[in-house]
Amino acid sequence: MKIIKKTLLFVCILASVVACDRSTEQTQEISIAEKQPKAEPVNESVNLLEINASGMRFESNNTILSGWTTIRLNNKDNMLHFAMVVRLPDGVTATMYSDDLGSVFQKGYDLMLEGKSEEVAAVFDAIPDWVPRLTYQGGPGFVSGNSSAQSTQYLEPGNYIIECYIKTNGIFHSYSPVPGQLAMLLPLTVAGTPGGMAEPSANATLTINESGIQLTGGELKAGKNSIRVNFDTQIRFPSFVGQDVHVIRIDSVADIQAALDWMDWQTPNGLLVPSPVTFLGGINDVMPSGSSAFFSVDLSPGRYAFIGEAPEADKKGLLLEFEIR
Ligand SMILES: [Cu+2]
């Protein structure tokens, strides 16, 4: 883990002629200040990365300060996108991620649809040896077209990518057929300089563990919600995906099964746009186990569910319905 320490260097030049008089004034000021009650320091700085999704590409600054970071995904397309944050091991670049891993998933998926299971296994056996050292660090969850989603997560300095692997016509948005060119994959540098943003507050807490998603604190409300997610576990399922949480609006009973069926990228219609239900954001996988992160979601009265991106999410406990009155 590369940690760049911020060095603060204070250079103080005092004119020797006036030093004596000023030091007397400073002593008096300090003694008055000490008699006043001390206010708790308030840190209101915002460490925000704004990403626009447009024409199946991300547009953004490619750097952010470290520590707590808010990432806002403004989806300007008519289709669903998300923005998963992945930390790259030292020596791995966004281009390597695209060329050596994105291409493997597209090839494996294509063979999967052709029913060539042995060839699929051979393709996935050939994934680069650095893949197990990728760590997943959140990022805004699934959000339908022409709307925004926002997550807040703690990012250490380093090199990252932001990825969307929704499919259009069977092609993952992050897949680039041209080596060296990036599709829906954004390189991100998290600088050594701390952004100084405080950990957000939340009105509700979700806990994710072996049993799935539970509401373990606070209350969901109409209007803007800040939701803390405690990732007590981070389980990787055989389909390579981890535990995460997204919000769907339930307009009819059929929406629940449609969303469950849609949440498996390995099926022809899975993660294929147009999505069968409306997604309002959430947060992608966070590692390691024991980490917490946050997402914001605006809820009008109605029925909703938290749902994980995994095959048979309900059987994994990754479906939690709720109502806002
Ligand atoms: Cu996308």
Image (cartoon, rainbow, N blue to C red):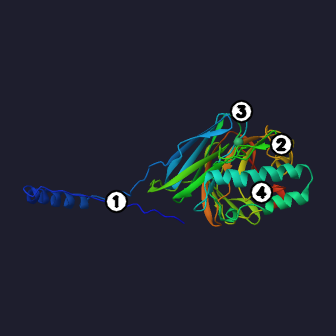
Amino acid at dot 1: Leu
Category of crowding for the residue at label 4, using alpha-carbon neighbours closer than 10 angstroms: few (below 14), some (14–19), many (at least 20):
many
Residue that badge 2 annotates:
255
Mark 1 vs mark 4: which is more N-terminal? 1
Q: Position of residue 145 (x, y in %)?
A: 70, 35
Q: On the rendering, which quadrant does ligand 1 occupy?
A: top right
Distance, label 3 to label 4, CA atoms, is 27 Å
Q: Is residue 265 visible?
A: no
User: Helix, strand, or loop for circle 4?
Assistant: loop
Residue that badge 4 annotates:
318
Q: Circles 3 and 1: CB distance less than 8 Å?
A: no
Q: Can you tell which mark lies on residue 8?
A: 1
Mark 3 vs mark 4: which is more N-terminal? 3
Residue that badge 3 annotates:
78
Q: Position of residue 111 (x, y in %)?
A: 87, 51
Amino acid at dot 4: Leu
Amino acid at dot 2: Asp
Mark 3 vs mark 1: which is more N-terminal? 1
Q: Circles 3 and 4: CB distance less than 8 Å?
A: no
Amino acid at dot 3: Asn
Cβ of mark 3 under 8 Å from ligand 1: the answer is no
Q: Circles 3 and 2: CB distance less than 8 Å?
A: no
Callout in the foreground (3, 4) = 3
Mark 3 vs mark 2: which is more N-terminal? 3
In which quadrant of the rendered image does the C terminus lie? top right
Category of crowding for the residue at label 1, using alpha-carbon neighbours closer than 10 angstroms: few (below 14), some (14–19), many (at least 20):
few
User: Helix, strand, or loop for circle 2?
Assistant: helix
Cβ of mark 4 under 8 Å from ligand 1: the answer is no
Distance, label 2 to label 1, CA atoms, is 54 Å
User: Helix, strand, or loop for circle 3?
Assistant: loop
